[in-house]
Amino acid sequence: MQRHPKKRARKNDSRLFDAYLVCESSLKRFLYRFYSRTEDIDEMVQETFLRAFDVELGQEIKSPKAYLFRVARNIALRELSKKSRQLTDYLEESVDESILARVASIEEDVIAQQKLQQCCNAIADLPEQCRRVFLLRKVHACSHKEIAAQLGISVRTVEKHLAKGVDRFTDYMAQQESTAEPKTKGPASAKHPWN
């Protein structure tokens, strides 16, 4: 019969909890490299602690502080990857073959031009270096390493600019969508601002 490690009776017995209390603000500063919104960072720090604490209940963590940072980094990269995929999916959905095959009405053409203009404005609104990284990744499909080499910056800096770019782009488009009145119920749905 397998013996399970004893669960800790009190949180004071947890080396991980003690490490978390000491480095919580450092974790937030670390995650700021990936995200700029405070609410995103707060959620990720909480998720970091919960995941790490869950692991600690089943096994001893030799370096709790290092483990917390590793978990935080993995969560941040996973979220960046998810947002990047969502943005790519939105852009791919905007080029619907059935819509391209038929002749667009004047109204649809005007709406499409307005949405494209909104996308261009969202990108133009990004800080210069952030915009370069965003365009190299999303338009030219360069890898993080290729972007870093081309711009003479680190891969981590590329990740930070990309995260900031995706956040700002998404926020800008959401704001445009919320202020715009629905014009049609046809192909130009309100699901994605660039459809």
Image (spheres, grey):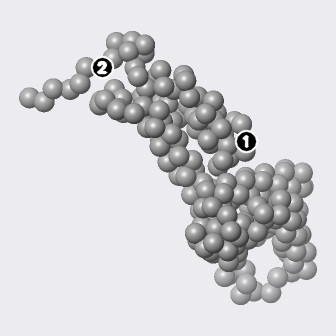
SS of the residue under disc 2: loop
Foreground residue among 5 and 89: 5
- Residue 65, given in percent of the width and then of the height, sits at 47, 32
The C terminus sits in image quarter = bottom right
Quickly name the residue at label 1. Answer: 37
The N terminus sits in image quarter = top left
Residue 182 against residue 33 in the figure, above or below: below
- Residue 160, given in percent of the width and then of the height, sits at 67, 54
The quadrant where residue 112 appears: bottom right
Residue 3 against residue 173 in the figure, above or below: above
- Residue 15, given in percent of the width and then of the height, sits at 41, 22
The quadrant where residue 10 appears: top left
Residue 7's tag is 2
Q: Are marks 1 and 2 in contact (CB under 8 Å)?
A: no
Residue 29 against residue 159 in the figure, above or below: above
- Residue 104, given in percent of the width and then of the height, sits at 82, 82
Foreground residue among 43 and 182: 43
x 85%, y 69%: residue: 120
Residue 74's tag is none
Q: Amino acid at mark 2?
A: Lys
